[in-house]
Amino acid sequence: MSNSSKRQTSWVKRLRTAALYIVLFSGVAFVVDAFRNSDVPESVPPELSSLTDINGEQYNLREMSKDSPVVLYFWATWCPVCPAVSPTVDYVGNHYPTISVALRSGDNEKLKHYAQAKGYEFPIVNDNLNRVSNGWQVSATPTIIIIENGDIVSATTGVTTPPGLFIRLWIHQFFLK
């Protein structure tokens, strides 16, 4: 066997191994998400469909999700993983309606300064008393919920990459209608 054939065989083996790891990781992530988010409601709770952000803007999740999937992002300033996920959510917010809910993260002024320092542009609902997160049965940060036509179509907890979030949105927007 020539050196080029050996190199080609080596790359094929590496690609197969990488594909296997991706499939296994995705399967484990799916099972963990299903377990962690088993209590998340199937649709937007009526009493929590209208949210007000720290600037006084009102958002109706049921209405917003009629035209396009909506990303609802639960996070906290004290969350060690959230700084890795928040830029992804902020970027996705340029393409899809996005609302964030900050859990026990201080008063509105503190949140405004924090968001400004980080460059976040997504709307922030202050949930200092956990009223919103409790109503959604969210127990871990970061949690991302995708809402379409008032229904919860996806919920994930933990690190999410831009491609991972966009794939979830595209699947539900274009293939699972």
Image (cartoon, helix red, strand yellow):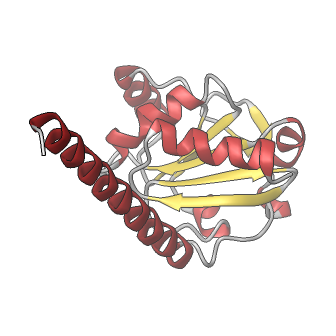
Residue 101 at x, y percent in the picture: 56, 47
User: Closer to the camera, 177 or 132?
Assistant: 177
Seen in the picture, residue 95 relative to 102 is either above or below; the reply is above
User: Closer to the camera, 40 or 15?
Assistant: 15
Residue at x 56% of width, y 74% of height: 34
Residue at x 42% of width, y 31% of height: 87
Seen in the picture, residue 156 relative to 134 is either above or below; the reply is above
In the shown orientation, is residue 116 left or right of residue 33? left
Residue 115 at x, y percent in the picture: 43, 28
Instruction: State the image quarter where residue 134 is shown.
Output: bottom right
In the shown orientation, is residue 27 left or right of residue 177? left
In the shown orientation, is residue 12 left or right of residue 164? left
Instruction: State the image quarter where residue 23 is shown.
Output: bottom left
In the shown orientation, is residue 134 left or right of residue 15? right
Residue 54 visible in the snapshot: yes
Seen in the picture, residue 46 relative to 65 is either above or below; the reply is below
Q: How many numbered discs, if any? A: 0
Instruction: State the image quarter where residue 20 is shown.
Output: bottom left
Spot the residue most to the front: 1
Residue 50 visible in the snapshot: no
Residue 177 at x, y percent in the picture: 86, 51
Residue 98 at x, y percent in the picture: 65, 36
Residue at x 12% of width, y 39% of height: 2
